[in-house]
């Protein structure tokens, strides 16, 4: 994962259920393991149920600070970003920004796109060809462009995180290579990594841990 840490601010975006949060947590862990200060920002202010809010202590034990929307996991259905969110633009701390799914989730980015541009950022599109809305490279590209248009920010690369959760096999990961390459071709963006759970043995992939159940 360390090869993906090319900026102090790293934005993770993509379709609902693509595995964005698991990627974000693994990236944050990699930064922390390298001895750097890091926070993970839950920027999903669309969905009122924030699983990250339940796991602040677990993330803290990994050396990761968590910034979550106010009123997360309460009966208040209009969450808002806390003031500490804006610290990511003025600190030397690394920040992994986990954006809500699809273009609707990117609205939160658009409000501060100028701050991201000024501070410097890298934004990765998480692709999962086993999700209905991104089953083809063409449909995935359409969503990618929608997120860019809404956020006013541009993607730097594609993380192929194609999986079927606990049913994922090495063969399923390998079968996604061609679709990821096709998405790269039509988008003009490089596939910066293909990820696979560290319980699988798949050549030419970046092993990641399954943090979804424990943390998010």
Image (cartoon, grey):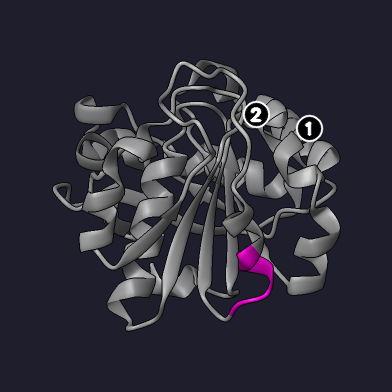
* Magenta highlight: main SS: helix
Q: Tell me the CA gap for discs 2 and 1.
A: 8 Å
Q: Is residue 179 left or right of residue 58?
A: right
Contact? badges 2 and 1 (CB < 8 Å): yes
Give residue 102's mark.
Answer: 2
Q: Secondary structure at mark 2?
A: helix
- Image quarter (top left, top right, bottom left or bottom right) of the N terminus: bottom left
> Can residue 205 be seen by looking at this rendering?
no
Report which residue position mark 1 lands on: 146
Residue 128: where, in percent of width, then height?
A: 48, 34
Lower position in the chain sequence, tag 2 or tag 1: 2
Q: Secondary structure at mark 1?
A: helix
Q: Is residue 153 left or right of residue 50?
A: right
Residue at x 34% of width, y 57% of height:
26
Picture quadrant of residue 77: top right
> Can residue 154 be seen by looking at this rendering?
yes
Q: As displayed, is residue 31 above or below residue 67? A: below
Residue at x 68% of width, y 60% of height:
156
Residue 162: where, in percent of width, then height?
A: 41, 36
Give residue 100's mark.
Answer: none
Asked whether 98 or 160 is in front, the reply is: 98
Asked whether 163 or 108 is in front, the reply is: 108
**Is residue 16 magenta-colored?**
no
- Image quarter (top left, top right, bottom left or bottom right) of the C terminus: top left
Residue 107: where, in percent of width, then height?
A: 75, 35
**Classed neighbour count for the residue bearing mark 1: other residues with Cα under 10 Å, few (<14), some (14–19), many (≥20):** some
Asked whether 175 or 20 is in front, the reply is: 20
Picture quadrant of residue 134: top right
Q: Is residue 49 left or right of residue 123?
A: left
The stretch of residues the image draws in magenta is: 87-91
């Amino acid at each position: 994962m360390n090869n993906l840490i090319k900026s102090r601010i790293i934005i993770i975006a993509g379709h609902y259920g693509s595995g964005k949060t698991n990627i974000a947590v693994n990236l944050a862990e990699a930064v922390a393991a390298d001895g750097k200060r890091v926070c993970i920002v839950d920027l999903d202010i669309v969905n009122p149920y924030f699983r990250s809010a339940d796991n602040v202590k677990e993330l803290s034990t990994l050396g990761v600070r968590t910034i979550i929307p106010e009123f997360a996991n309460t009966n208040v259905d209009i969450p808002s970003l806390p003031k500490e969110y804006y610290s990511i633009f003025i600190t030397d701390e690394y920040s992994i920004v986990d954006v809500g799914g699809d273009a609707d989730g990117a609205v939160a980015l658009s409000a501060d796109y100028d701050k991201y541009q000024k501070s410097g950022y890298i934004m990765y599109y998480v692709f999962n060809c086993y999700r209905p809305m991104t089953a083809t490279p063409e449909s995935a590209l359409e969503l990618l462009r929608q997120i860019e248009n809404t956020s006013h920010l541009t993607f730097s690369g594609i993380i192929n995180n194609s999986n079927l959760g606990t049913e994922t096999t090495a063969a399923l990961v390998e079968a996604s290579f061609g679709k990821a390459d096709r998405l790269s071709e039509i988008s003009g963006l490089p596939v910066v990594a293909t990820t696979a759970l560290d319980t699988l043995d798949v050549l030419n992939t970046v092993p990641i841990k399954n943090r979804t159940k424990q943390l998010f």
